[in-house]
Amino acid sequence: MPAQGDDQIEFDFVADFPLVVQRHQGQITSDAGLLPVRQFDQKWKFTERLAACLTDLLPGRGQSLLSMVRQRVFGIIAGYEDCNDHDDLRDEPVFKLIAGRLPDDKPLASQPTLSRFENGVLPGELLKLVEFTIQTGVERLVDRNKGTMPGSLTLDLDATDDPTHGDQQLSLFHGYYDQYQYYPLIISEPTSRHVFLAQLRHGTAHASLGADDDLMKVVNALRSARRDVAVHVRGDSGFGLPVMYDVCEQNSLTYTLGFSSNPRLKKLTEGLMARAVEQFKQTGEKARLFECFQYKCDSWICFRTVIAKAECHAGGTNLRFVVTNLPEVKTPEDGQRIYDDYIQRGESEHRMNELKNGLSAGRLSCHRFMPNFFRLILHTASCNLLNALRDHPDLPPLLQRGQPQTWRASLIKVAATIVTTTRRIVVRLAGQWPWWHLYQSVARRAIGFTPAAFSVSS
């Protein structure tokens, strides 16, 4: 029968041979796929510059800021999103290599040390980290455009609920989501998939709270790189407010923002919906009709263009509106073209899915608000590092499109033995591992990466 002891486990399902499982006391890792990610980070100096935004308030603790930043960023990528996880990773050889140490060097930071590190963040440092996140987004656009800023781009604004599970500062009850939560604002760019800004906000914030100022932080950084860049702004109806129209119009930004329905709009579009219902009755296929018109709320200073979409299908009817200041919007065809571009913001909603589900950005469990903001930035940095690495046509489509979970299953979670000699460190992967070709492609991407010019945040 199967036996189990302190040092080994024995199974009996292999005929005539006992199967013994033992712990190997040498240098073995389960996360060897982090090494090419770390090589990419080295070329971009990403975590180095992120750590430069911070001030070491406890220099005598024996752990450098850079080492702890790398522990947290690469831990999040590998699925170790909690500081508690690092108590079991202190002697992990790959994490030591990532942190700049040899496998036999002293242990890495423990959970209490990492927690003190996160709780020591200062308001000015958070501002520098926000600027760093924006600046690296500019670099990503320059990289994708062969060394220059593109002439036009889109920024997507969205708010996402972040449930809290304790007595966290500014965790408040939100009636719509029926939970205690934070309510972060996310600004991302769809082609690079870079999260330009992740702003932590209290739990009952309106979706648009601070969005005007945060949007202009990003826009000003983009215009510093290219003065004439044309920026289009997209957001759902939570951002369809006069404050957002005004900031866009005053700063020469175009926008397409969702707009909540009201009785007056429904009255104006009764005919459009009636035609959609009639078309569905006649064809049995989904009818989708559009209309453009000038509209002015009492709180608006001027008329603006509203696009209505009336849809009828087997599941019922659907009436939606957006407001835009794009020029030459007159025909139903214009309206459909603009609305179809607006709904492409769903691509940027994937960033929130990756942050929250793939990289566990909801683990904001510190008591104080500022450390939780810092944690959100660390999770965002992990997301942006992975996005930058996977954004290359020579990578297999599985990795280009892959969520963080896919990267872990296909690349990061690979066992290896690590041998340190007097001349080199050798990492040996299993010869039968099926994803070696993926590892090779990511390694080529990391080694061959030549980043755009960057400047250290100050």
Image: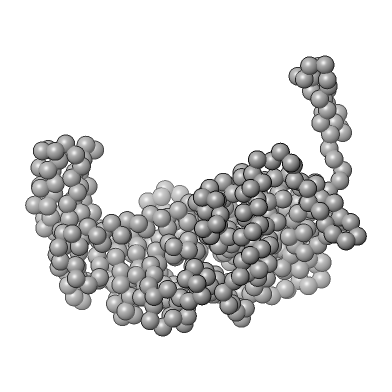
User: Which x, y percent locates residue 201?
Assistant: 48, 64
User: Which x, y percent locates residue 61?
Assistant: 80, 67
Residue 66 in view of the camera: yes
Q: Residue at x 65, y 40 (%)?
A: 434
The image quarter containing residue 383 is bottom right
Decide if residue 148 is on the left or right side of residue 5.
left
> In terms of depth relative to the viewer, which is nearer, 220 or 186?
220
Q: How many marks?
A: 0
Q: Residue at x 43, y 61 (%)?
A: 190
Q: Residue at x 19, y 49 (%)?
A: 288
Q: Quadrant of the C terminus?
A: bottom right
Residue 376 in view of the camera: no
Q: Residue at x 52, y 70 (%)?
A: 143
Decide if residue 75 is on the left or right side of residue 268.
right
Decide if residue 360 is on the left or right side of residue 290.
right
User: Which x, y percent locates residue 376?
Assistant: 56, 61
> In terms of depth relative to the viewer, which is nearer, 285 or 268?
285
> In terms of depth relative to the viewer, which is nearer, 286 or 217?
286
User: Which x, y percent locates residue 14?
Assistant: 77, 20
